[in-house]
Image (cartoon, rainbow, N blue to C red):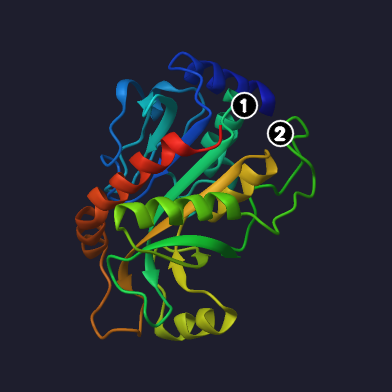
Amino acid sequence: MDHMERFREAAQSIRELGSPKVAVVLGSGLSRILPLEGERVKKFTEIPGFPRPTVEGHAGEVAVGTLGGKEVLVQRGRIHFYEGYDLAEVVFPVRVYALVGVRILILTNAAGGIRFGFFPGDLVLISDHINFLGANPLRGPNIAELGPRFPDMSAAYDPELRKLAREVGAELGIPLKEGVYLAALGPSYETPAEIRAFRAWGADLVGMSTVPEVIAARHAGMRVLGISVVTNFAAGVAPQPLSHEEVLEVTQAKAAELGRLLSALIPRLPV
C-alpha cells in the first residue's frame, strides 16, 4: 500500500464521523475539556493506520460533533516521538485531517515555563517554535499531494488566529501570554544547563510535542493556533524536581479555563 492510499483509507474512516473544517488536538490531561454536541467517536484503534498512544493522560480517540453550530473534530490524546514512533507516524493523524478538509488546526499541550515571569497555570499562545527534536516529519520523499517539498515556516502560528484568541480571552477575563515553544526529544525532563541554553536561544516554553504536527499542518496548508498550559517551572527555574504527576495536576486545574476559551473561540473561527 503506498503512502497516499494509507492516508485516503484513514480519511475515509474519519469522514464517516463528519466533514469538519476545524480540528483540535488536546494534549496531556486535557482530553475531557471540549465535549461536543451529538459527537461521534472512534478510537485510534478503529482508524486504519493511526498509531496507539502509550502515555497516561492521553485517551487516544477522535470525536466529531458540533460546537456553537460549527462542526469540529477533537483528537483526545496524541502520539509523541519519544514513544518510539517515527515522526511520520506522529504526524499521520494531522495529515489525514488535511485530506478530510480541515483548514484550521488548534494544538494544545502541557509545557514547562522557561521565561522568568511564566508561572504554572499560565495559558500561553505559541508565537513561534524551535525544533530541537533532531528530526523533521517531512524527511524522506515529499508527498506532493499533501504539500510542497520546501514549505514556508515564517508564520507557522497564524497571527490572525492569535489576535482572535487574545480578543476572546479578554472578553472572558482569561489572560493569555505569548511565547516561543521549544520541542525537546524527551522523555527525560531537561537539565538546568539545557534550560539555560534554551533561554539564550530565545525559547520561553519547553515541551515534547506539537512542533512535528505544526510542520505537517503547514506543509498541507492548514492554519495553526498553538496554546500551551504552563504546568511547571522548567528545570533550574525553581528548586523542586519535575514529575508527570505534577504536569497532569496543574493541567487538570486549568482545563476548565482552557475549555471555556476554546468553546468561545471555535464558533468565531473564519471557516
Q: Amino acid at mark 1?
A: Leu
Q: Which residue position holds label 1? A: 99
- Identified at 43% across, 30% down, the residue is 73
Element assignment for label 1 = helix
Q: In this view, which residue lies farthest toward the top? A: 16
Q: Is residue 199 left or right of residue 254?
A: right
Q: Which residue position holds label 2? A: 146
Q: Is residue 157 visible?
A: no
- Identified at 43% across, 38% down, the residue is 266
Depth order, front residue of 124/47: 124
Whichever of callouts 1 and 2 sits on the residue coming sooner in the sequence is: 1
Disc number for residue 54: none
Q: Residues within 10 Å of mark 2 (few under 14, many from 20)?
A: some
Depth order, front residue of 54/168: 168
Against 248, is 4 above or below?
A: above
Against 236, is 73 above or below?
A: above
Q: Amino acid at mark 2?
A: Leu
Q: Are marks 1 and 2 in contact (CB under 8 Å)?
A: yes
- Where residue 2 appears, x then y in whole percent? 69, 25
Against 269, is 119 above or below?
A: below
Q: Is residue 169 left or right of residue 216?
A: left
Q: Is residue 244 left or right of residue 183?
A: left
- Identified at 55% across, 62% down, the residue is 127
- Where residue 72 appears, x then y in whole percent? 43, 29
Depth order, front residue of 136/251: 251
